[in-house]
Amino acid sequence: MPDIQHRTVKANGLSMHIAECGAGHGVGKVVLLCHGFPETWYSWRHQLRALGTGGFFAVAPDMRGYGRTGSPPLVERFTLLDLVGDMVGLLDSLGAPDAVIVGHDWGAPVAWHAALLRPDRFRGVIALSVPFRPRPPTPPTTRMPQDEARQFYQLHFQAEGVAEAEFDPAPRRVLRGMLYAASGDAPPGGDIGMVPRAAGMLALLPDPPALPPWISEADVDAYAADFAATGFRGGLNWYRNIDRNWALLAPFAGLKVRCPALYIAGERDLVVNFRGAREAIAAMPALVPDLRGSILLPGCGHWTQQERAPEVNAAILGFLRDL
C-alpha cells in the first residue's frame, strides 16, 4: 500500500495542512476529500490509500479552522464562499487543472457548492450524508426546532463560547461520545440532536464501554490530539455562518449542479432521518441532472466513509473510472 504523506501548502491565504496519497496532478487524477465536524483529514485515512492504489492522487486537507490548517480570528471568515475558495486555492497550489471533489457532513455542502460555482475546476462531485438542497425561502436557523426546554444542536452552537466551554476541556470525551452516538452501532432511540438548555450537549453524549470495530481507541486519540491543540472554535464557526451563507448565496438560487455526481449515505444516518431529508434525496435528480446514483448503506450511521470503508471506496472508484 502507498504511504500517506503530509505537508503544508498555501491556499486562499491560509496555511493548509494536507494529507496526500498517490502520484500525478494531471487532468482527471486529483480527488479532494473534504471532512466535516468534528473531524480532520484523518476521517479519510481509508480512502486516501484506496485512491492512491487505484491510480488517483488523493488529497485530504484539514479544512479551515481544523487541525494544522489556519483558523482566521473573525467568525464571518468561515462562509461557504470562503470554503469553496479554499478548495480552488488548494488546486492552484497543487498545480492541478481540475479535480473530483468529495465531501462528508459539512464537507458535503462545500463539495456541492464547489461543483455548483466552479464547474470549470470540479469535474465531478461525491457527497456523503448531506444531499443537495435548493436554497430555502427563509434563513435556516428560523426553521430549526426549539422549545423552552430544548433547542436543535445547531442553534446551541450559534453563541460564541458556549459550546467551546463544554467541549474544549474534554476533547476525547466529546469525540468518543459523538463518534459512537451518531454511528449505526448506537442503540435506536438515542437523540443527540435536541440539546437541553439547562444541561448542554455534553450531557447527551454516551460513554460506551467499548467502541464498534470500525473505530479504535487509537483513532479517537488521533482526533483528540488535534482538538486538544486547537479547540473546537474553528469547526463551530462553520455553524455560525449558516444564515450568512443563505444571504450570500442568494444570487445563485435556482442553479443546478450539472457535473456528474454521486450521493452516499447510511440508512441510520441522523441527517438522512431528520425531517424532510428523505424527500430532499428523492428530489435530487431534478436539481442534479447527472446524478449517477444515490446509495443508502444498510445499518450505517453518520460516519459513512469510516463505518463502511470498503463499500465507500468501491463506490468512489467506480464513479471515478466511469467519468
Image (cartoon, grey):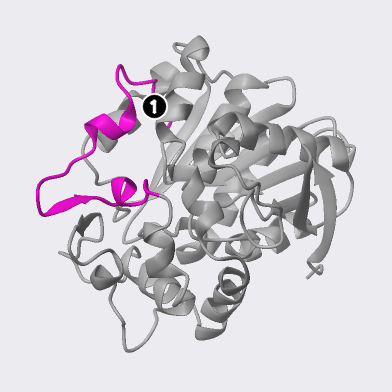
* In the image: residue 44, left or right of residue 88: left
Quarter assignment of residue 76: top right
Please give the range of residues in magenta: 132-159
Q: Relative to 126, does residue 41 appear above or below in the rendering?
A: below
Q: Residue at x 30, y 70 (%)?
A: 202
Q: Nearer the viewer, residue 275 or 54?
A: 275
Q: Main structural element of the magenta stretch: helix, strand or loop?
A: loop
Indicate yes or no whether the magenta region holds residue 151. Answer: yes
The residue under the point 33% across, 25% down is: 139
Please state, as top left, top right, bottom left or bottom right, where the N terminus lies in the image: bottom right
Q: Position of residue 280 (x, y in %)?
A: 31, 29
Q: Vertical placement of 8 versus 135: above or below?
A: below
Residue 73 seen: yes
Q: Residue furthest bottom?
A: 209
Q: Find residue 41 and report its horizontal and vertical position in percent.
A: 64, 60
Q: Does residue 136 appear to the left or right of 323 in the view shown? A: left
Label 1: which secondary element: loop
Q: Compare residues 109 and 145 and report the one nearer the observer.
A: 145
At which x and y percent is residue 306?
51, 64
Q: Is 277 included in the stretch rendered in magenta?
A: no
Locate residue 70, reporting x and y percent: 71, 52
- Residue bearing mark 1: 133
* Closer to the camera in the image, 265 or 133: 133
Q: Residue at x 44, y 41 (%)?
A: 240
* Residue drawn where x is 57% and y is 52% of the image: 35
At label 1, the amino acid type is Arg
